[in-house]
Amino acid sequence: MRDLFAAAVAVVLLIVAASLGTTLTAFRRRRLRARDSERALGRTVVAEIPADEDLRLFSEDAARFYYGDASVDKDLIVAARVLINGSPIASYVSRRHPVDTTRHATSFEDRPEGIARDRWDVAIETVTGMMLVECGAIRERVSQELARTVFDAIKGELERRDGIEN
């Protein structure tokens, strides 16, 4: 009887392992298809940002930055700010736009996600409005690195357009 029970448990564990392997393979293929479709459109993937159910790509081409389905023209960007729990901790303001955005620091309402989880976002301010790139609240610096990568890409573009050499 004991051997029969052990065999049943082994079969169940094999089925669960096969299911997990299949799910991971499907997820990997879907992710690769998304990256390939971005490349086919002539875009460079800057970061893969975890969303609720899947990854959302932050990418760029010569004229725009893309975050999921949203896009922002590079020429219209006035400032970029890294936000932690809705408050700016780093920013870059373009010299090309006469609007004084340094006096009006970007901030968003703090989301009640607990003390242990800091929310990292990047606010992209444009002439026409603002786009928020939600980088997440994952521990161990993952979200912080994603926010820094997105911010550095935008800041690099603004510095290039402002004529600042790196």
Image (cartoon, helix red, strand yellow):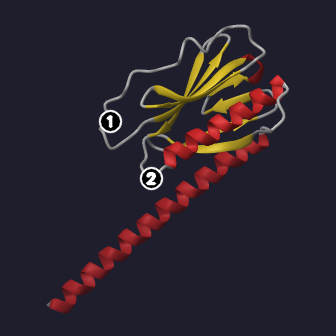
Residue 3: give x, y in percent of width and height: 21, 91
Disc assigned to residue 20 = none
Q: Is 112 or 159 nearer to us in this picture?
A: 159
Residue 136: give x, y in percent of width and height: 46, 39
Q: Is 138 or 21 nearer to us in this picture?
A: 138
The tally of labels here is: 2
Q: Residue at x 70, y 31 (%)?
A: 155
The image shows residue 106, relative to residue 6, as above or below, that is above
Q: Which residue is mark 1?
A: 113
Mark 1 burial class by Cα count in 10 Å: few <14, some 14-19, many 20+: few
Answer left or right for 7 relative to 108: left
Three-letter code, disc 2: Glu
Answer left or right for 163 relative to 144: right
- Which element type, helix, strand or loop, lies under badge 2? loop
Q: Which residue is mark 2?
A: 140
Q: Is 57 or 104 nearer to us in this picture?
A: 104
Answer left or right for 30 relative to 156: left
- Which element type, helix, strand or loop, lies under badge 1? loop
Q: Is 118 or 134 nearer to us in this picture?
A: 118
Three-letter code, disc 1: Glu
The image shows residue 89, relative to residue 102, as above or below, that is below
**Quarter of the image where the C terminus is located:** top right
Asked if one can make out residue 108 in the rendered structure from this viewpoint, the answer is yes
Residue 141: give x, y in percent of width and height: 48, 49
